[in-house]
Image: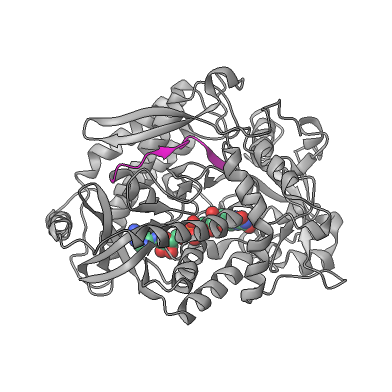
Amino acid sequence: MYEHDLLIIGAGLAGLRAAVEGVRGGADVAVVTKVHPVRSHSNAAQGGINAPLTDRGDDWESHALDTIKGSDYLADQDAVEIMSREAGEAVIELEHMGVIFSRDDEGRLGTRRFGGQKVARTFFVGAITGSALLHVLYEQAIKYGLRVYEEWFVTSLIEEDGVVRGAVALDLRTGELHTIRAKAVIIAAGGAGRVFEPSTNAIICTGDGLALAWRAGAPMMDMEMVQYHPTTLARTGILMSEAARGEGAYLLNKQGDRFMETYAPEYLELASRDVVSRSEQTEINEGRGIDGNVLLDLRHLGRSFIEERLGYLQEVAVEFLGMDLANDPVPIRPGMHYIMGGIKTDVNGRTEAPGLYAAGECANVSVHGANRLGANSLLDTVVFGRRAARHALEYIKSVNGTSRDESQLEADKARLQALLDRPQGIRSAALRREMAEAMTEGIGVFRDQASMERAETAVRRARDQFANVSVQDKGKTFNMDLMFALELDYVIDCAEAICAGALARKESRGAHYRTDITQRDDENWLKHTLVYKTDEGLRVDTSPVAITKWEPVKRVY
Ligand SMILES: Cc1cc2nc3c(=O)[nH]c(=O)nc-3n(C[C@H](O)[C@H](O)[C@H](O)COP(=O)(O)OP(=O)(O)OC[C@H]3O[C@@H](n4cnc5c(N)ncnc54)[C@H](O)[C@@H]3O)c2cc1C
């Protein structure tokens, strides 16, 4: 049994930013993470982090409007305002903590322009922005005495009288389950990319945090809003960062045309991601693609520029396709990348489950609405990670002691043992792949009633078959087979919520583009979808979108 004031589940950027706030505030804070902190998916972010800095002639309102337009007016404008106003300070604070951002020739922080934005306001560290941020935050948190349970896998939240009071976690090294008691819990467990196949996300992105909060009664919001990134490498699905287009790369079809001239005459390749992905998919569907792909062309940028500014992308092209970006346009296509939906929270990270906060990709504040702008996610993690911790520190002052209840630990021991005791059955990997491919097919760049119903049927089948999943490794030490099975349970929860949200929304907005209802319908659908898990099954509800000063208008790029 372990005990802390504040328990944070997840050591990516959201979790570590929250942790730094907590330990600096003098609280006894612990982070539990299923991988070493710096192996969290945040580590993979290359492109950068947005901030409107006033000394660059930029301003928070311009960033807020780009974000809101990008979201197809589904983002809550009060939340966006907070993010845009706090962005500059949050990024400069990271610099002061020790992040060495790339600089321009005059020695000022370097910027590049990302999609859906008129201004170059994306700050970066070479091609390793996420990694650089993550290492600095980890170092800061450790300096202030953060306790890290690393390679521990959370199996359940502990609830007492409807209040979240800690978690049960499996120490992967020993195979033992433990109770970690806390006065408040922040979930910062990242995205759910593995609900889809393929995805740019690491295999650890299995939506555990979303499912844990959902099971504790917090609704998932706008889960139908799944981002397909416009440039993932053919065959492998590896992300070719938006930095490529930010630095001037073109998109070409089979005939060598820059087809974005037709779809987004002003922004071209730097329209918002949903728009670019749909344009590419239209080219492919109408026969102007090459083997299901279009081309990303950097040749005109020249070898030295490519190697200096986009060296990592050059490495990927050479290693995975044997292609040289200075000589060859590379085949790319839209690929599942990010989940705009998540656990509904207020601007202080509070979920509808008392004692439980959420921040980062697993949360939905909502600042991304129906489509996230590139480089706004890293910003979201640091701004709202910090806010969640600040609020939680206040909240724990009112909490007297921690729970003494061990019943969740006993229930989880029995649940895991039952999985291990099942002699033979289906392999979790095969079951996940089958369902995840059906999700991509049914809830892709384009979708309609029939395709979404097919996805839902596949998810229902996966839920039924999960009862027959077996774990072949019966050992205690690093039993990954057992962990994959537990993750699949979470993945299926997320898929259920995505299908429910998608089938509920009877319009097209942002990433949710229905070929059977192609119009945005502000009269009936300028609202969030909420999906609750109840004892009687799923319950779908809606809630209003916060509109402050930007009335929805037609979105044109
Ligand atoms: C390839 C790639 C490139 C990207 N590039 C950019 C970019 O340039 N700019 C941008 O703004 N965004 C980018 N994004 C998105 C952005 O990186 C993520 O949305 C963001 O980093 C998520 O941070 P997080 O802290 O919420 O979660 P993560 O970094 O995913 O961390 C999740 C944490 O939760 C822990 N965890 C999960 N489940 C459990 C469990 N059951 N028990 C214990 N611990 C658990 C994990 O161990 C991990 O520590 C990119 C995403 C990808 C996939």
Magenta span includes 458:
no
**At 75% across and 30% down in the image, what residue appears?**
556
**At 61% across and 56% down in the image, what residue appears?**
379
Task: Please provide percent x and percent y for residue 147.
Answer: 37, 75
Find residue 154 and report its image quarter: bottom left
Q: Main secondary structure of the magenta part?
A: loop
Find residue 179 and report its image quarter: bottom left
State the extent of the magenta-drawn residues as a range: 216-227
Q: Nearer the viewer, residue 515 or 385?
A: 385
Task: Please provide percent x and percent y for residue 83.
Answer: 61, 51
Numbered label tally: 0
Task: Please provide percent x and percent y for residue 55.
Answer: 81, 60
Q: Is residue 259 above or below residue 479?
A: above
Task: Please provide percent x and percent y for residue 331.
Answer: 68, 48
422 to the left or right of 521: left
| Quadrant of the drawing holding the C terminus | top right
